[in-house]
Image (spheres, rainbow, N blue to C red):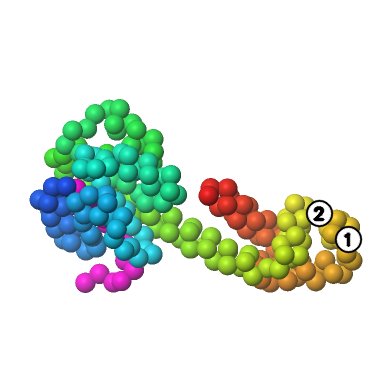
Amino acid sequence: MTPAGAPVVFVIDDDAGVRTSIQGLLKSVGLRSESFGTTQEFLRSKRQDEPSCLVLDVRLPGVNGLDFQRQLVDAGLQIPIIFITGHGDIPMTVRAMKSGAVEFLTKPFRDHDLLNAIHQALDRARTIHQQQSELAALGDCYESLTPREREVMALVVSGMLNKQVASELGTSEITVKIHRGHVMRKMQADSLAELVRMAAKLEGSSGKK
């Protein structure tokens, strides 16, 4: 039995036989999976906060796999995708890979090739999940800062000295030192260099939204 929180593989294919076959293969190697006949069913499902990937058929009723990939990208949902299709062509493959697909497999494919692609996708998913968790924790720390502490942090990471920050904010250097100490403690930063990296991550995440 796989533990809760273990990675999960979502299979979306309108062919019930294909879904059953893939889920049987995944179960045989100890991987959790859930399957859906359409992308709409997948979107309606409740998903936990865990690393996951998507085995996605290209030709589906309603929204096809490639258009669904674009929707996920546009929505900022980073879920690694392995495409499967019985009717692949080079332009289709190029489009999928350019949009970040892990693999594009043409039916019938070997079990070994699918499992290799899934393990690669789950490795990528674990990395994404870890980065998102770290970013969420960083965001919580930043939210705990007062408006003045955020001002001090922005000026400090831009390279200003305490006396320059004091001049910019119209306050005393000792007050800036106190605010800076609060910032370092609340952000759990051990050094200015680490605080600069944290600020860059926060800025990068807000820029993606």
Q: Residue at x 18, y 61 (%)?
A: 27
Which residue carries the number 1 mark?
170
Q: Residue at x 19, y 51 (%)?
A: 37
From the image, give the main secondary structure of the stretch colored magenta: loop
Query: For the residue carrying disc 2, how many other residues have a C-alpha within 10 Å: few (<14), some (14-19), or many (20+)?
Result: some
Q: Amino acid at mark 1?
A: Gly
The residue carrying mark 2 is: 160
**Viewer-proximal residue, 55 or 66?**
66
x, y percentage for residue 209?
53, 49
192, above or below 37, in the image: below
User: How far separated are the C-alphas under marks 1 and 2?
Assistant: 14 Å
Residue at 29% x, 58% y: name it.
Answer: 44
For residue 119, say whether it is visible. no
Mark 1 or mark 2: whose residue is earlier in sequence: 2
Residue 65 x/y as whole percent:
28, 42
Q: Residue furthest left?
A: 17
* Magenta segment: 1-13
Q: Per the image, is 175 magenta?
A: no
Out of 199 and 43, give the one closest to the viewer. 43
Q: Secondary structure at mark 2?
A: loop
